[in-house]
Image (cartoon, rainbow, N blue to C red):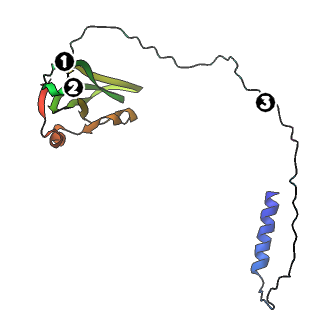
């Protein structure tokens, strides 16, 4: 049917383009007096398939990842900050930085912490290793414990940003010199 319609259209175009048409009279429409009465739209009774939606139990293969968490004692850097009384009571909290990596192994380490008024800048370093991860994607992290009033925290990471959406949470710099302008007015309070 589609081929027939295309053929008819092509023949009509061929016919219309192969002749010369000249108008010999102007168009004049007839005068029409119309009275309109209310109409009625048709109604239809449609019988359709009876559909049941539910679940069935099937055996399928799915990947299974097992993560075992265990507690171990490790040395975690501890920073105790004494601020003027106007900043409120001190509270111990963990400052953590994370990166999601793939392709090759990386190391992430908090190197420095800078402070100005009620703001902290945590500077970490992300170094690419040599061990290949294959198709694995991992999250790596580092942390310090901070005993200070509630402060605003920004994270800067020195290193190449891995191409994972998760890593958009932090600002990445190629080297420490690129972030010097951002650290003006800040005092270094921690260094690894």
Q: Residue at x 87, y 76 (%)?
A: 33
Residue hosting label 1: 77
Q: Which mark is residue 110?
A: 2
Q: Are marks 2 and 1 in contact (CB under 8 Å)?
A: yes
Cα–Cα gap, marks 2 and 3: 59 Å
Q: Residue at x 16, y 31 (%)?
A: 114
Q: Residue at x 35, y 8 (%)?
A: 70
x and y, in percent, of residue 173 in the image: 23, 39
Q: Nearer the viewer, residue 187 or 169?
A: 187
Residue hosting label 3: 51
Residue 4 seen from this side: yes
Cα–Cα gap, marks 2 and 1: 9 Å
Number of residue marks: 3
x and y, in percent, of residue 128 in the image: 27, 30
* Residue 29: quadrant of the picture: bottom right
Q: Is residue 78 magenta?
A: no
In the displayed structure, would residue 153 be above or below residue 32? above
* Residue 134: quadrant of the picture: top left
């Amino acid at each position: 049917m589609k081929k027939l319609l295309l053929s008819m259209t092509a023949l009509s175009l061929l016919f219309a383009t192969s002749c010369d048409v000249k108008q010999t009279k102007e168009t004049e429409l007839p005068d029409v007096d119309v009275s309109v009465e209310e109409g009625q739209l048709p109604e239809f009774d449609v019988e359709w398939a009876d559909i049941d939606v539910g679940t069935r139990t099937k055996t399928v293969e799915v990947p299974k990842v097992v993560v075992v968490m265990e507690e171990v004692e490790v040395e975690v850097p501890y920073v105790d900050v004494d601020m003027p009384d106007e900043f409120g009571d001190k509270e111990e909290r963990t400052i953590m930085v994370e990166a999601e990596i793939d392709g090759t192994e990386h190391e992430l380490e908090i190197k420095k912490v800078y402070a100005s008024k009620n703001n902290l800048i945590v500077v970490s370093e992300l170094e690419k290793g040599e061990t290949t991860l294959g198709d694995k994607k991992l999250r790596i992290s580092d942390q310090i414990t901070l005993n200070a009033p509630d402060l605003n925290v920004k994270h800067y990471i020195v290193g190449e940003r891995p191409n994972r959406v998760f890593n958009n949470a932090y600002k990445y710099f190629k080297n420490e010199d690129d972030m010097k302008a951002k650290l003006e007015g800040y005092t270094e309070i921690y260094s690894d």
